[in-house]
Image (cartoon, grey):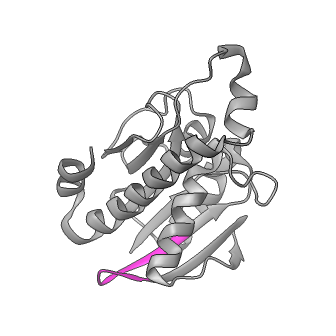
Amino acid sequence: MYLIVGLGNPEPEYSNTRHNMGFDVINKISKISNIKVSKKKFDAFYGVGEINSNKVILVKPQTFMNLSGESIIKFKKFYKIQNKNIIVIYDDMDLSVGTIRIKAKGSAGTHNGMKSVVENLKTEEFLRVRVGIGVPENKEDTINYVIGKIPKREMEILEKAQEKAAQSIFEILENGIDSAMNKFN
């Protein structure tokens, strides 16, 4: 069983913001796989289904970004999911707009949502799919940048990246992380 988590802030207020890339990718996976993410448990919306013969739980924590790990650890413990079967999808300012990167493990960097995930899981060893959102021109404007509305042209680029990120999840589930990294990184 795989736990596939998209990080974000509760919708609809934060819809179409850079910080909700994880939610947006989960929405795409949900649509493609016909797994509705509408049940509520452990401070999250979630859906259970099957992708490429793998049982999966798609999760959108509703704890706000900085407490995402609190929801994830509850799913991990309840369903007895191994860390190697946890995939976290999130926005990353260290990557240029529209780039995606898949990693088997790594630090949380400056991302507060990922800091919460690492702190709650007590490990950095879980899969992650990062969607590049770039950096604001004015570094002091980071908060407004990540939770502000996205200009139309940039949104078109990010929607393509979300699609690639969703496809990378299907590749991970079918052929493993190495294949996904070779294909999408």
Query: Looking at the image, can residue 141 be seen?
Result: yes
Figure check: 169 above or below 178: below
Query: Looking at the image, can residue 75 be seen?
Result: no
The answer to whether residue 9 is left or right of residue 124 is right
Give the residue drawn at x 55%, y 40%.
114
Magenta extent = 50-58
Tell me which corner region of the image, top left, top right, bottom left or bottom right, holds residue 164: bottom left
* Quarter the N terminus occupies: bottom left
Figure check: 5 above or below 41: above
Nearest to the observer: residue 49 or residue 75: 49
Nearest to the observer: residue 49 or residue 24: 24
Q: Residue 3 appears at what percent x and percent y?
A: 46, 66
Q: Residue 35 appears at what percent x and percent y?
A: 52, 82
Figure check: 23 above or below 108: below
Question: Extreme front residue here?
Answer: 153
The answer to whether residue 53 is left or right of residue 13 is left
Q: Residue 155 magenta-drawn?
A: no
Nearest to the observer: residue 74 or residue 101: 101
Q: Residue 62 appears at what percent x and percent y?
A: 73, 59
The answer to whether residue 41 is left or right of residue 78 is right
Give the residue drawn at x 57%, y 42%.
153
* Quarter the C terminus occupies: top left
Nearest to the observer: residue 179 or residue 24: 24
Q: Main structural element of the magenta stretch: helix, strand or loop?
A: strand
Tell me which corner region of the image, top left, top right, bottom left or bottom right, holds residue 18: top right
Give the residue drawn at x 17%, y 49%.
182
